[in-house]
Amino acid sequence: MNSTLAQPAETGIRRPAQTGHIILDRVTVRFGEDVRGRRAIFDTSLEIRPREFVCLLGPSGCGKSTLLNCIAGYIRPSSGEVRVDGHIVERPGPERGMVFQQYSLFPWKSIRDNIAFGPLRAGKSRAEALAIADHFLTMIGLSGFSKRYPAELSGGMQQRVGIARALANYPSVLLMDEPFGALDAQTRAMMQESLLRIWGEVETTVVFVTHDVDEAIFLADRIVVMSAGPGRIIADQDVPLLRPRSPDILTDDTFIRIKKSCLARIRAESLKAFQQQNR
């Protein structure tokens, strides 16, 4: 990958070469007003290196999205801390872009204006913001749709716009909460390939929540498997598959080995959760 972020020269935006370093230090999250509240995450520590693509995997209710929201700054840990590039995360910030499963676009704004919204809020002139929007429209292959509105686009196209909007502030970290979960299988596969291509260009750190083991292995450098609630990290699996990746890799022996290992862990944790719910 290139050592600098691909971007339109006229914007003048640059970010340091090695940003996007995430550290979670003994993070616990309780939902409730006191120490007896329900623990969603318990005593969890994790380091994610700059420009890594890390997938969070685990059974429903294991705290994957809660962990992601801690990094985003939407949830404050009950104890422990989250640091990004040495700074404690206390609130959302433009250096951490977020993409949700719902497309979360402004329906009354054109696609171009949706992407330009963040740069405008950051103080860019309208000309600068539109130049950034045009850059990312080209990157996601939707230059011909700049004047369209979200309702005129397919789900996959809307999610591409959501990714572009999150990247328009040139964040050092891109956080993605099951962004392809609502898409059909074929569109989802195409979006996975598109995301890897975009990630190769922007060189940002990605933390991606998914329930789909195949998706996690196809995308990630590392897979972090979480336990049934309260969420803890029970496995940190490297994915030693060469890049760039194509769908052919799904039949690779290494892919299959990692899949079996992840499925076994998730099944064991899902059974624990089921037994806890039925006591």
Image (spheres, grey):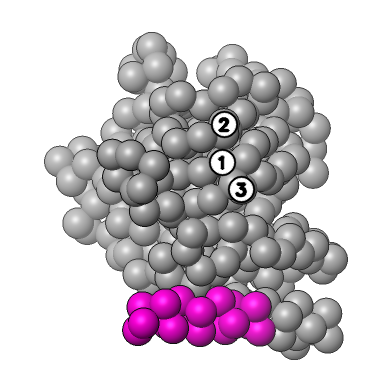
| Residue 267 magenta | yes
- Chief SS of the magenta region: helix
Residue numbers of the magenta segment: 263-279
* Residue 92, above or below 154: above
Which residue position holds label 3? 44
Q: Are marks 3 and 2 in contact (CB under 8 Å)?
A: no
> Which amino acid, mark 2?
Glu
Which residue position holds label 1? 27
* Residue drawn where x is 59% and y is 63% of the image: 226
* Picture disc at residue 266: none
Q: Are marks 2 and 1 in contact (CB under 8 Å)?
A: yes
> Which amino acid, mark 3?
Thr
Mark 1 is surrounded, within 10 Å at the Cα level, by few (under 14), some (14 to 19) or many (20 or more) other residues, namely many
Q: Is residue 82 left or right of residue 230?
A: right
Q: State the image quarter where residue 197 is shown.
A: bottom right
Distance from the alpha carbon under mark 3 to that under mark 2 = 10 Å
Which residue position holds label 2? 81
Q: Are marks 1 and 3 in contact (CB under 8 Å)?
A: yes
